[in-house]
Amino acid sequence: MLSSFALTISNAIYLELTLKSIVKTIALACLGASLLAAPAFANPSDFPTKPVRLVVPFGSGSLDAVARSLGRQLGGKWKQPVVIENKPGAGGNIGADMVMKAEPDGQTLLFAGPSIAINPVLYSSVPYRLMEDLIPVADVVRIPYVIVVSPQVPARTLKELVDYAKANPGVLNFGSGGVGTASHLAGELLKLRAGIQMVHIPHKGAAATLTELLAGRIHVAVDTVSQYKQYIERGELRALAVPGPSRLPELPNIPTAKEAGVADLEVAAWGSVWAPRGTPPNVVDKIANDIAAATGDPSVRRDWAALGMVPVGTGPAALKTWSLNEANKWSTVIKSANIRAE
């Protein structure tokens, strides 16, 4: 009986030791897995170790030029090339989807325009969830807008345009680069804030809108100053107001929309950098800080100002606030105008 009891005790001790061994093995395995899954750059100064891809979800234009300028600045600082990859299509969704699915190590980034905040409302389905699948890194630039009319329009001020539109509902039209584009939504915001009716005429790109505007077949447009500045200076287009918080150095005599009598009408193109979900916070912070340094460089500020662009250079928190405010604003406009892109 004693021998049987001793055997039982021995078996119990063996079982306990075996269980402890199993638990220890599992714990070590989990630790190893967590170390393997840990950020590749425990020290952010190690970032980057190879060329960085900056995906631009549109073709040539003002924001593409900013992305390339920024890429050159960052490449020089990082001692690694920043490769610009243009991936246009589906209003920017194709490029966003590519970055969302990339390895979250900071080596693949998205340089987005306003569509990053507009598309989740504009499209019935988008491949990403803002702030979840894509996380904010840095707010980079603003590109101011201006409200212009063809010289054939009998209005020399924004108030005169509003008065004429109210007296002749549906007579005026406004052009844009296509359904759901920033210039389309800007025109709809003008209609909403001023309480007027204008017929939307979409085109395949801003260049086509400009051609029709100069020919007088389009009456009104709201788009970037850089797009229209030379034509305003030559008297081929008439600038009525700047839909922004302040007057612009390049158009000092043109009032803001608020000064001209239409409140809460602020529109600007903007460029920002985003990363895939799971990108280590210390890497996000390093990229944001380096972008802030790049946008603060005097030569960059001078070059961008010459193109009618305003450097920003704020980090993730500021970009999150800005983009959510933009999403809310454009959601109201899209629903009010019943706009839908498929």
Image: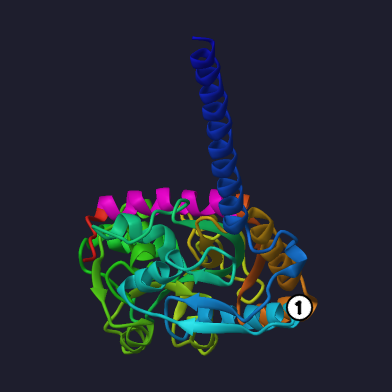
Q: Which residues are magenta?
A: 319-336
Residue 150, percent from left and from top:
37, 80
- Which quarter shows the C terminus? bottom left
Residue 51 is situated, as x and y percent measured from the top left of the image, at 62, 81
Question: Is residue 39 rendered to the left or right of residue 115?
Answer: right
Compared with residue 287, is residue 24 higher up or lower down, i.e. above or below? above
Residue 149 falls in image quadrant: bottom left
Residue 193 versus residue 163: which sits nearer the camera?
193
Under circle 1, the secondary element is: helix
Horizontal arrangement in the rendering, residue 313 relative to residue 26 (left or right): right
- Residue sticking out furthest to the top: 1
Q: Give, as a three-letter code, the residue at label 1.
A: Lys
Apparent side of residue 75 relative to residue 337 in the rendered image (left or right): right
Q: Does 104 sit above or below residue 80?
A: above
Q: Residue at x 69, y 68 (%)?
A: 291
Residue found 73% across the figure and 73% down from its top: 294
Q: Tell me where residue 91 appears, x and y as whole percent.
A: 34, 71
Residue 327 shown left or right of residue 32 in the figure: left
Which of 112 and 26 lies nearest the eye of the viewer?
26
Residue to which mark 1 is pinned? 77
The answer to which image quadrant residue 148 occupies is: bottom left
Evaluate whether residue 264 shows in this view: no
Give me the residue at 53% from left, 39% from top: 22
**Residue 215 or 107: which is nearer the viewer?**
107
Residue 244 rendering spot, x and y as whole percentages: 54, 60
Q: Quadrant of residue 26?
A: top right
Give the crowd class for mark 1: few <14, some 14-19, many >=20 residues within 10 Å.
Answer: few
Whether 65 is drawn above or below 296: the answer is below
Count every numbered label the image shows and give the total: 1
Task: Between residue 260 and residue 131, name the one nearer to us.
Answer: 131
Question: Of helix, strand and loop, which mostly describes the magenta segment?
Answer: helix
Let me know if residue 253 appears in the view.
yes
